[in-house]
Image: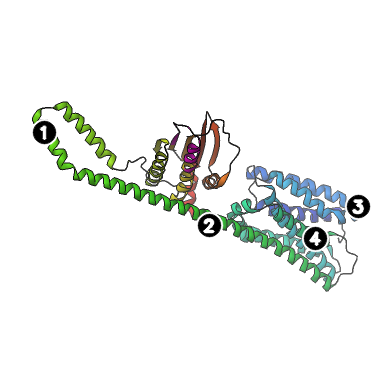
Amino acid sequence: MLGGSFWVAMLRNGLSAFLLMAVFLLLDRPRLPMKKTILYYVVYGTGLNFLYSLWYMVSIRSFVKFSGLSALLLVGIFCFAMSGEGIYLSLYKMALAFYLLAVCVALGIDISRLWFDGNRWVDLLIRVDITVIAILLVAVKFRKSFLYNLDFLREEMDLFSAVTMLISIMVASLIIFWPNEQPISMGNIVRLLVNLFMAGIVQYTIFHLYIHLGKEHIYQEENRILAMNEQLLRFQCSLAQEAEERAARIHHDVRHHCLLIQDYVKKGETDQLLYYLNQYIEDVESAGVKRICENRTINSILSVYARQAEMNGTKVEMDAAVAEHSPVRDIDLVAILANVFENAIHGAGQSGAADAKIKMSIRQKGHKLVIQCRNTIRPGQRFEGEAGIGMASIRKTAQRYDGETDFSVEDGMFVTRILLNIESNAESNAES
């Protein structure tokens, strides 16, 4: 610490608070509207700056020892309270902000002491320059990548990564902020820079490690969905083959049908003729694959799984009204509907009920796609929270469309409700 008046302390502390809060806010998705969030940041930062400057005037020695770590704690708690993200992601952002602050403080003080006889204005100028450069780098280079991979980080970050980062930052910060009685030298500065460099490498490595893990899990999930898609295609081919065989049989029997109809006409047996014709019409209609929905992907998924459920002895009721072309990707429709139907078939099959059934409803209402599935379950069975790959896949896929999912048990039925915001997804696809 190079000393100075109350106002010099205000400038230093203000730069430090600005760097911490600006970096965190650039990488954050606040829970409040941005204008209100910025207002709270300004008020809190200004008040904290004033209190820390008073602390500096009252006891410089204690301020030098404890101001850095206490600022990390107080600013961190405030930013976490304003953030819409989880604790681990907030810890990472605050660790990065504090790391940049440590670099700013270390370079400002040591360069000023080494080459400018401890000139406090040189220190301030260096801090201003480094603060501007750091914020520009975060805003221009790092922010886009961070927010783009935010879902991967949110899913993968855990206690281990958070503790590892905090330890690396604490070690570096203790070296920087704790008073050092040794004379300033190039060797000490080099050691300090090496410590800062290693702490930065730890953060960078953890950041990319968890992005890689997140992408790997996405690839695994997409492979699982592709396998489900392949299974769907096999079922579709089986249904088409059965329909073709029925159609061939009906075509082969046309001559016999015509002879029998001719005989009924000659004998004047009108009632028997009408009864026979009704049976013949039903047989012809059953030869084709029934169209459940205008959307081909949804129609195929429902047809295949409805047939599979009926083969297991489960009655299926379906009501699907979705436009032929939907903003929802086909692979996402498979991920949602196939998982929902598989869970329903599994639940109904294990219910032990003689009249087990599945009710599926899919409706497109404006810019919303509403999916609801109800299936029979065992008497007294309760839902104890999301479990299994299927539900996790449904939830993650719905999040891509700013959607909502709900799983519950109502009147002896397991109920799955899914709401997709297809308007926002269409707009994002158009922009990309």
User: Between marks 1 and 3, how big is the CA–CA gap?
Assistant: 115 Å
Q: CA distance from mark 3 to mark 2?
A: 56 Å
Question: Residue 7, relative to residue 337: is it above or below?
Answer: below
- Name which residue type carries label 2: Tyr
Q: CA distance from mark 2 to mark 4?
A: 37 Å
State the residue position of label 1.
263
Measured in 3D between alpha carbons, the distance from the residue under mark 1 to the one under mark 4, in whole angstroms, is 100 Å
Position of 162 relative to 402 (above/below): below
Q: Nearer the viewer, mark 3 or mark 2?
A: 2
Label 1 vs 4, first from the N-terminus: 4
Amino acid type indicated by mark 1: Asp
Query: In the picture shown, does residue 45 fall above or below 200?
Result: above
Residue located farthest toward the left when viewing the structure as drawn: 266
**Residue placed under numbered mark 2 in the picture:** 219
Q: Which is more N-terminal, label 3 or label 4?
A: 3
Label 3 neighbourhood size at 10 Å, few (<14), some (14-19), many (20+)?
Answer: few
> Circle 4 — which element?
helix
Q: Helix or strand or loop: what does disc 3 sit on?
A: loop
Residues shaded magenta:
342-360
Q: Which residue is mark 4?
A: 171
Q: How many marks?
A: 4
Nearest to N terminus: mark 1 or mark 2: 2
Name which residue type carries label 3. Answer: Ser
The residue at which mark 3 appears reads as 59
Q: Is residue 152 magenta?
A: no
Q: Work out which quarter of the rendered image holds the N terminus and state it.
A: bottom right
Color encoding of the figure: rainbow
The numbered mark, 2 or 4, whose residue comes first in the sequence reads 4
